Amino acid sequence: MAKAREIGRRMQSVQSTRKITRTMEMVATSKLRKAQQRVVHARPYAERLAAVVENLITPELAELDPLLRQPERIRRAAVVLVTSNRGLCGAFNVNLIRKARELIDYLKASDVSTELHVVGKKGIAYFGFRGVELGTARIDIGDDPTPEQAHDLITPLAEAFVRETIDAIYIVHAEFRSVMSTPPTVRRLLPVEVPEDRPGREPNYILDPSADVILERILPLYIDNVTYRALVENAAAEQGSRRTAMKAATDNADDLLTNLRRQYNRARQAEITSQIAEIIGGAEALAGK
């Protein structure tokens, strides 16, 4: 009976684990729907805003606004890495950290000094364990990022760019394409790319006030919006990765339970057969007396 009892304990353990993974899958699915809605709502506005900025910027205006500064050579860059506060989401954080390390290695190879700013406990724990000094370590941005949080995160770095303390800002985050596809991506926030020449593209609108005044007002909004979009894309990608990971864990638990039930039934059948044989043997021994 010992073998069947041991298999029964394993089955109970797997069933308990399956309840947890199944619950987490359902929670992630619920949060994913809300996160997807935020991404869907954020993308059109971000794309239109980026198009407006692109159409307004000219090399002449780039010399007037400090946020449009185009350094001759990037000597110091800030890397903002967005990770999650919780685990159990597959290789989500591992891929993001790997992408950030690749970017930092590339910048260092190009003789660019870097400062790292990390959002999320997983990224903070990884680099903290390795003794990497962090310029920013934030764990207050959760599943529902807000524009205010994006503003608070990026404003000090934008001000450092204006002061020429840093020459570039990169954001590493996950891009939400689908539940099964959430690749890490690198987005350069500053300096803003200034088109040198746009032949044949004449504006079909009249600007009032002037383009430089509009840019002065819209550029901070653009920078905040790019950061906010990175946060909401990353939040949706995290829930998608967690749902995928928990579904895989639940399916594996189902397969394991099926195999354990077969083993339990075989072990129990063998034990019952052995017990019946012992009873028959004992009865025959008594009859022989």
Image (spheres, rainbow, N blue to C red):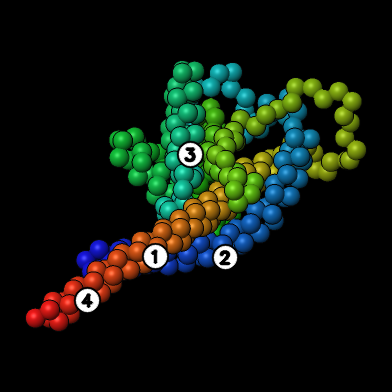
Specify the amino acid type for callout 4. Answer: Ile
- Determine which quarter of the picture holds residue 263: bottom left
Return the disc, 1 or 2, that comes first in the chain's sequence: 2
Specify the amino acid type for callout 1. Answer: Arg
Q: How far apart are marks 1 and 3 (CA)?
A: 37 Å
Which mark lies nearer to you, 2 or 4?
A: 4
Specify the amino acid type for callout 3. Answer: Asn
Q: Residue 51 carries which label?
A: none
Q: How far apart are marks 4 and 1 (CA)?
A: 28 Å
Q: Can the viewer see residue 220?
A: no
Check disc 4 and report the residue beneath it: 280
Q: Distance between the residues labelled 2 and 4?
A: 59 Å
Which mark lies nearer to you, 1 or 3?
A: 1
Query: How would you rate the neighbour count of disc 1 (Cα within 10 Å): few for under 14, some for 14-19, many for 20 or more?
Result: some
Q: Which mark is residue 261?
A: 1
Which mark lies nearer to you, 1 or 2?
A: 1
Which mark lies nearer to you, 4 or 1?
A: 4
Considering every residue shown, the one lying at the far front of the view is: 288
Q: How far apart are marks 1 and 2 (CA)?
A: 32 Å
Q: Which mark is residue 95?
A: 3
- Determine which quarter of the picture holds residue 4: bottom left
Specify the amino acid type for callout 2. Answer: Ser
Q: Can the viewer see residue 104?
A: yes
Q: How far apart are marks 3 and 2 (CA)?
A: 24 Å
Query: How would you rate the neighbour count of disc 3 (Cα within 10 Å): few for under 14, some for 14-19, many for 20 or more?
Result: some
Check disc 2 and report the residue beneath it: 30
